[in-house]
Image (cartoon, rainbow, N blue to C red):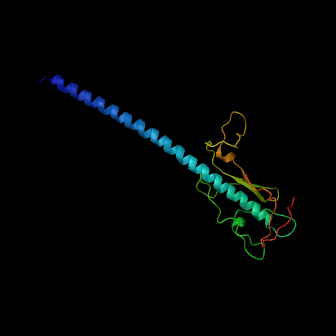
Amino acid sequence: MTPTAGVRQRGFTYLWLIFVLAAGAAAAAAIGQRTSVAVQREHEAELLFRGQEIAQALSRYRAATPGAIKQLPTSLQDLVEDKRGLRTLHHLRRVYADPFTGHNDWVVLTTEDGRIWGVHSRARTPALRTKDLQAPSPGETARVCDWIFRFVELPHATNPDGAASAPSS
């Protein structure tokens, strides 16, 4: 056996090893990308659920206001424990964390007198789901913070005791 035959064999094995490692790295990158997209879709679905829960709680809070003048809460904690009536109402089980940040750090949208009318996420992540979501301006990418979750006037609100009340303007 000549000394050059062993060198050629080692060179081929080295080249084969580099090819296998490159193919493995490409496969791992593809799996990582797919997993990242799946995680973002899950976060977006959870953001929509939690945001809609907060919006519905804002609507219920407003509808449950005693008297003719309907009010919105001054804090998200007011949605968890509404002590304005004879009994404590719970419009929301807890103040949910923003799924993108993992913290209760919603951007709270308030009226001039400090009453909360809506919330949106603080995350500036580009949105995958863009149905019913418009970019802030043409040519820009829609972001998850563009989803605004706001109270909606309930068409036929009921009082906490179950009696129907007239809709207010």
Closer-to-camera residue (61/156): 156
Q: Position of residue 78 (x, y in %)?
A: 72, 66
The C terminus sits in image quarter: bottom right
**Residue at image coords 69%, 33%:** 139
The N terminus sits in image quarter: top left
69 left or right of 54 in image: right
Q: Position of residue 157 (x, y in %)?
A: 80, 64
Q: Is residue 119 above or below residue 19?
A: below
Q: How many marks?
A: 0
In this view, the residue farthest toward the bottom is 86
Q: In which quarter of the image is residue 115?
A: bottom right
**Residue at image coords 35%, 35%:** 21
Q: Position of residue 34 (x, y in %)?
A: 50, 42
24 left or right of 10 in image: right
Q: Position of residue 130 (x, y in %)?
A: 66, 42
**Residue at image coords 81%, 67%:** 65
Q: In this view, does 139 lie above or below 49?
A: above
**Residue at image coords 78%, 71%:** 162
